[in-house]
Image (tube, grey):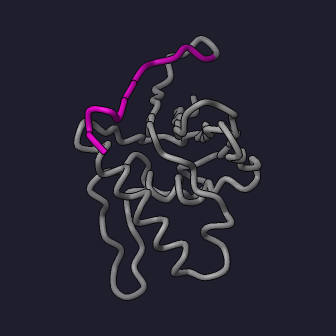
Amino acid sequence: MDEKTIKFNPYLIEKEGKHVRALTIVLPGIRAISRNQTSGHYFKYREQLKRAERWMLTYGKAVEYHFEKQVDVTIEAYYNTKGRRKLTDTPNIDDKIFTDILNRFKPRKKGPAAERAVWFIEDDAPKFLRKVTKRSVPCTYDEVRIFIEAVS
């Protein structure tokens, strides 16, 4: 995947009379990971997580932003439904994968956690991540959009 195809859009939005930092990460050509691909065994999850980390690393070569306040995350999965391709049910979108790749530290089985080369939020604990919402969108292409918005 060419890093030029990864789009980044940092902006300030007005919410309740205040300007709030928000950004959108667009991963074109990426089909969102389903819980069916990651459930069952840790190795399945780890394999998919490594894939998702590569997407974020590619994106991160362009730019990153470290949110210091609590955030809300929305994950939109656009699915190419041409022919017999099926839209993944919204509850089956693995939001854990996409929130994990936003975190600063990557946990390890042995030893201390390692800092990721690209990160947006300190951790996915409630102190830093208030809520995650997700939706499935029928489309003519595959794409994942991750919206991060600071809580005012």
57 on left or right of 98: left
Quadrant location of residue 3? top left
Q: Nearer the viewer, residue 47 or 63?
A: 47
Which residue sits at x=53%, y=53%?
99
Which residue sits at x=24%, y=36%?
62
Identity of the residue furthest to the bottom in this view: 110
Which quarter of the rendering shows the N terminus?
Answer: top left
Quadrant location of residue 12? top left
Quadrant location of residue 117? bottom left
Image location (x, y in percent) of residue 4: 26, 32
Question: Residue 2: within the magenta?
Answer: yes
On the question of residue 68 being in view, the answer is yes
105 on left or right of 93: left
Image location (x, y in percent) of residue 139: 64, 31
126 on left or right of 143: right
Which residue sits at x=42%, y=42%?
68
Query: Start and end of the magenta stretch?
Result: 1-15
Image location (x, y in percent) of residue 135: 70, 39
Question: Residue 142: within the magenta?
Answer: no
Image location (x, y in percent) of residue 87: 72, 44
Predominant secondary structure, magenta span? strand
Q: Nearer the viewer, residue 115 or 127?
A: 115
Which quarter of the rendering shows the C terminus?
Answer: top right
Q: Nearer the viewer, residue 96 or 136?
A: 136
Which residue sits at x=48%, y=57%?
123
Query: Image height check: is 42 above or below 35?
Result: below
Query: Image height check: is 37 above or below 78?
Result: below
On the question of residue 146 being in view, the answer is no
Identity of the residue furthest to the front in this view: 83
